[in-house]
Image (tube, grey):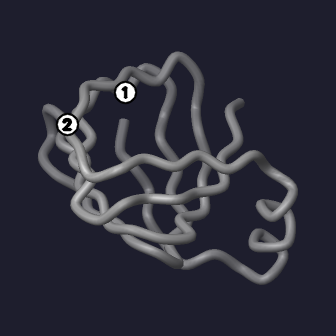
Amino acid sequence: MAIQVRKPTEDEKKKASSWPIWTKEVSSFPWRYDSSETCLILEGEVTVKTSQGEVSFMAGDWVVFPRGLECTWIVKKPVRKHYNFG
């Protein structure tokens, strides 16, 4: 159950542009994924802590969170992202 972080393809960027946008100020909060989430990070810097360790990502990254993941988000720079559940 690992978080995947990579650079998106041009097609993925186009696809994500129609998804909703979520924003969050610098903060820390617990989160559980009831379904998988794919997102394109537009701004910011985040570290997510899980029982397996830490994963960091920032503007320009394509991130996939698996269903059932329990984690803590640590928003280091205000984040803005396109997101899609399922």
x and y percent of residue 64 in the render? Answer: 52, 50
Do labels 1 and 2 touch, CB within 8 Å? yes
x and y percent of residue 60 in the render? Answer: 53, 78
Please indicate whether residue 52 sits to the left or right of residue 56 in the image.
left
Residue at (48, 35) in percent of width and height? 66
Dot 2 alpha-carbon crowd within 10 angstroms: few under 14, some 14 to 19, many 20 or more: some
Please indicate whether residue 54 sits to the left or right of residue 41 in the image.
left
Q: Amino acid at mark 2?
A: Thr
User: Vertical placement of 48 versus 33: above or below?
Assistant: below
Quadrant of residue 29 in the image? top left
- First in sequence: mark 1 vs mark 2: 2
Quadrant of residue 30 in the image? top left
Residue at (79, 50) in percent of width and height? 19
x and y percent of residue 4 in the render? Answer: 44, 56
Q: Amino acid at mark 1?
A: Leu
Please indicate whether residue 45 sits to the left or right of residue 63 in the image.
left
Which residue position holds label 1?
69
Residue at (29, 65) in percent of width and height? 77
Residue that lies at the very extreme toward the front in this rendered image: 25
Q: Quadrant of the C terminus?
A: top right
Residue at (70, 41) in percent of width and height? 84
Please indicate whether residue 35 sits to the left or right of residue 46 in the image.
right
x and y percent of residue 51 in the render? Answer: 14, 32
- Residue 29 got which mark? none
Which residue position holds label 2?
50
Quadrant of residue 8 in the image? bottom right
Q: Quadrant of the N terminus?
A: top left
Q: Name the one closer to the observer, 2 or 50.
A: 50
Q: Secondary structure at mark 2?
A: strand
Residue that lies at the very extreme toward the bottom in this rendered image: 10
The mark total stands at 2
